[in-house]
Amino acid sequence: MLSGFFIGWRASHVPEKGEVMANHFTPEELAKELGMEERDVIRFCVDEGIPIYKGKIDRSLLAVVMKAKGLHVPDFAVASPSSLAHC
């Protein structure tokens, strides 16, 4: 038996201080945080190629794209593009 064979580094990875972990939220939750309509959050994600998987959006990826587009990003954690490279 190969104990732990199917467990990748993420399963045992403990985030270090300052490391941003992906947080996935519904468009409704993000719309409330951003002060937008839910349909506008969905439209933005579709237009910018941000995946919506099982009804959830990666908040860190959304923040990075918004920042790159010069849009206001709320005070939630913003990942840097280099921190998302290993995702």
Image (cartoon, helix red, strand yellow):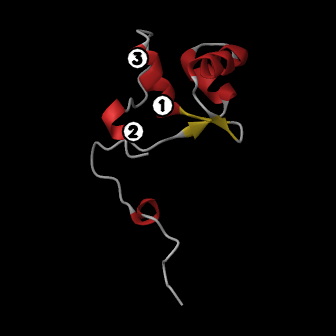
Residue at image location 60% in from the left, 26% down from the top: 30
Q: Secondary structure at mark 3?
A: helix
Quadrant position of residue 84 = top left
Answer with left or right where residue 84 lies relative to residue 33.
Answer: left
Amino acid bearing label 3: Lys
Answer with left or right where residue 47 lies relative to residue 20.
Answer: right
Residue at image location 44% in from the left, 45% down from the top: 87
Label placed on residue 67: 3
Amino acid bearing label 2: Leu
Which residue lies under the disc numbered 2?
84
User: Dot 3, how many residues are within 10 Å of its Cα: few (below 14), some (14-19), or many (20+)?
Assistant: some
Rendered view: 70 above or below 57: above
Residue at image location 36% in from the left, 59% down from the top: 14
Q: Are marks 3 and 2 in contact (CB under 8 Å)?
A: no
Amino acid bearing label 1: Leu
- x, y percentage for residue 80? 33, 31
Q: Are marks 1 and 2 in contact (CB under 8 Å)?
A: yes
Is residue 45 at all visible to an observer of this figure?
yes
- Distance in Å between CA atoms under marks 3 and 1: 10 Å
Tally of numbered tags? 3
Q: Are marks 3 and 1 in contact (CB under 8 Å)?
A: no
**Mark 2 or mark 3, which is nearer the start of the sequence?**
3
User: Dot 2, how many residues are within 10 Å of its Cα: few (below 14), some (14-19), or many (20+)?
Assistant: some
- Distance in Å between CA atoms under marks 3 and 2: 14 Å
- x, y percentage for residue 24? 57, 39
Residue at the left extreme?
17
Which residue lies under the disc numbered 1?
61
**Mark 2 or mark 1, which is nearer the start of the sequence?**
1
- Distance in Å between CA atoms under marks 1 and 2: 8 Å
3 or 2: mark nearer the eye: 2
- x, y percentage for residue 21? 42, 44
